[in-house]
Amino acid sequence: MASLVQLPFEETPPLRAAPRLRELQARGPVHRIRTATGDPAWLVTGYQEVRALLADPRLGRAHPDPARAARTGESALFGGPMGNYDTEDADHARMRSLLQPHFTPKRMRALRPRVEALATGLLDDLARRHPPADLTEALAFPLPVLVICELLGVPYEERDRFRAWTRDSIDVRDEARSLRGLAALFAYGQQLVGRKRAHPGDDVISRLCDTEGTTDEEIAILSMSLLIAGYETTVVALGMGALMLLADPRQWQALREDAGLIPAALEELLRAAGKGGGGIPRYARTGLQIGGVAIAAGDLVLLDNGAANHDESIFPGPDRFDVTRPPATHLTFGHGARYCLGAPLARIELQAVFSQLIPRFPGMRLAVPPGELTLTRDPLTGGLARLPVAW
């Protein structure tokens, strides 16, 4: 056990991957490691292996003996097993069936003009400021929060409350804090359901309240799950995307000169932003082989989609951010039955930001050297603490 590689990997500047992770990847696709809690696990870093396992029914989020299961961290929400082992597949299918109607292509297309208008308003506010300004605070954080609030029917003015509870709930180091945050979020979700039953609107929570067979408890859980998932990861993607573009003026210039590159550039941004070093936790429901390595039933398997997105065999020069890179299917949003429901919405938000930010602020630049920027280490999703820019 003492010789196992320990997570998390060493801290590096935001644009650099952990050298130890890249060393592991060079050795093969599957690695025995120790999690932050000291538990043994398997880290899968190869693209083909991660992609296949994301859709493999032999892996799941539940465990037959949760109290004895290996953990990735102290978060009550994400640190260990989730769900009922015996009914996991049926429970997941029900959750998807309840949420999928609210994320159809038609609904997302209808939402696009509103997202673009919200981005325009935030950029108007930014233009009125005196540089330097923090792009995280001015744009990357408020846009996803505004969008998810409108979609769910959550009051935007309550953002400081639910953001604090969200941060608490996903804390990977302090279980007591995580439990308090999770309890506060669930209580808040129940309050919102009560409000919507009394005063329904044109939003997801109201429509869930009208869905036959749903309970207030189930709606509160689904709504708060969407709230957590609906903005944190997009905040990170917007901030890291802006950083990667601004850190290499050639990339920014290429998109200035040819806006037609933006859709493919956003996929490259989504691929390159996560350098890897953790991954999506799964538990083996049965014994299986991964890359010639025997995995025992009950073992914790971390599917490192960030590392897979930097697999040299699929993405030549994987640590090079290149907006002209020929498209290939990244795994940022997962794959298979658990593919992220909010992926189309995230793409709409990224498109709304970068299609406007670059032409409106053609001379934007970093206000500090990239090496001085830091990542937030406590939240599960990471991301930039600040992104000072000038123009």
Image (tube, rainbow, N blue to C red):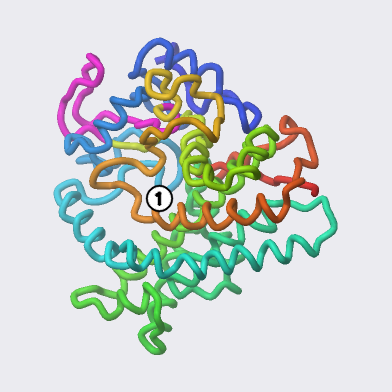
Q: Is residue 266 above or below residue 120?
A: above
Q: Is residue 183 above or below residue 88?
A: below
Q: Residue at x 65, y 53 (%)?
A: 357
Specify few, some or many for label 1: CA neighbours under 10 Å numbering under 14, 14-19, or 20 or more. some
Q: Is 297 one of the magenta-colored residues?
A: yes
Residue 244 in the image, given as x and y percentages of width and height? 62, 36
Magenta part of the chain: 283-307
Q: Is residue 378 left or right of residue 28?
A: right
Q: Residue at x 22, y 36 (%)?
A: 59
Residue 142 in the image, given as x and y percentages of width and height? 61, 61
Q: Residue at x 53, y 52 (%)?
A: 350
Residue 156 in the image, given as x and y percentages of width and height? 57, 72
Q: Is residue 196 left or right of residue 144?
A: left
Q: Is residue 136 above or below residue 288?
A: below
Compare residues 148 and 91 and report the one nearer the observer. 148
Compare residues 371 and 41 and report the one nearer the observer. 371
Compare residues 366 and 161 and report the one nearer the observer. 366
Q: How many marks?
A: 1
Amino acid type assigned to the residue bearing label 1 in the image = Leu
The residue tagged 1 is: 77
Residue 80 in the image, given as x and y percentages of width and height? 36, 41
Name of the residue lying farthest toward the right: 130
Q: Is residue 372 above or below residue 148?
A: above
Q: Quadrant of the N terminus?
A: top left
Q: Is 105 one of the magenta-colored residues?
A: no
Q: Residue at x 51, y 70 (%)?
A: 114
Helix, strand or loop for disc 1:
loop
Q: Is residue 215 left or right of residue 277?
A: left
